[in-house]
Image (tube, helix red, strand yellow):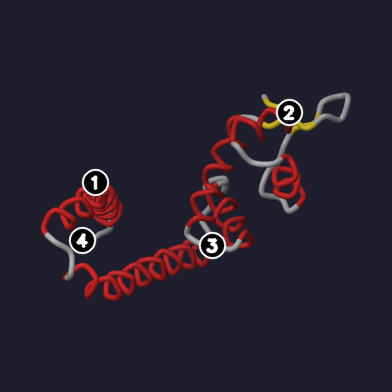
Amino acid sequence: MYRIGQIAKLMNISKRTIDYYTQIGLLSPTRTDSNYRLYGEESIQILNFIEHYKNLNLPLEEIKSLIELLKTDGSIDNKKVEKHFDQIGSIMQHLKEEIMVMEPILKKLNHNQKEVLVSKLSLEGIALAQTLLLLFGKVEGF
């Protein structure tokens, strides 16, 4: 368990940010008898999750709903799942548009420059494709 200053240092974010995330319900620390907030491993996972989705420009309100979706007790709210997949679809559409914008620039690169870019994206792209295939491979008809 970590006190606010410890987890802030560990995660390289400000105590104020952690305090804000706690206030809006993204983090749920336990309290000591002395009223200190203690953050556990779940908080670290949630902070990593928040950082990931913030990098994708997802608003904190939507990140909060995703965290709540992950914390469900086994019951699934189909509307929340569909909303999350809609968000993933939007991100994928945005990536497709980015690629289209980059296409003329990529055509101007020499072979070595292209190889460097491909090597940077290949592992991530392959991992993403495999994850999607695994997820959707379990759905009937895929």
Residues packed near mark 2 inside 10 Å, few (<14), some (14 to 19) or many (20 plus): some
Residues packed near mark 4 inside 10 Å, few (<14), some (14 to 19) or many (20 plus): few
The nearer-to-camera label among 2 and 4 is 2
Please state the horizontal and vertical placement of residue 66, each as a whole percent of the image: 55, 55
Of the residues shown, which amino acid type is indicated by label 3? Answer: Leu
SS of the residue at dot 1?
Answer: helix
Residues packed near mark 3 inside 10 Å, few (<14), some (14 to 19) or many (20 plus): some
Please state the horizontal and vertical placement of residue 102, each as a whole percent of the image: 28, 71
- Is label 4 in contact with label 3 (beta carbons under 8 Å)? no
Of the residues shown, which amino acid type is indicated by label 1? Answer: Leu
Q: CA distance from mark 4 to mark 1?
A: 24 Å
Query: For this view, does 49 lie left or right of residue 39?
Result: left
Of the residues shown, which amino acid type is indicated by label 4? Answer: Phe
- Is label 1 in contact with label 3 (beta carbons under 8 Å)? no
Q: Quadrant of the C terminus?
A: bottom left
- Residue bearing the label numbered 1: 123
* Mark sitting earlier along the chain (1/3): 3
Of the residues shown, which amino acid type is indicated by label 2? Answer: Arg
At x 24%, y 54%, the residue is 129
Front residue of this view, candidates 129 and 56 = 56
Please state the horizontal and vertical placement of residue 80, each as a whole percent of the image: 53, 63
SS of the residue at dot 2?
Answer: strand
* Mark sitting earlier along the chain (2/4): 2
SS of the residue at dot 4?
Answer: loop
At x 57%, y 46%, the residue is 71
Check residue 3 in the rendering and tell me which mark sits there, or answer none: 2
Q: Quadrant of the N terminus?
A: top right
At x 20%, y 54%, the residue is 118
At x 38%, y 71%, the residue is 94
* Mark sitting earlier along the chain (4/3): 3
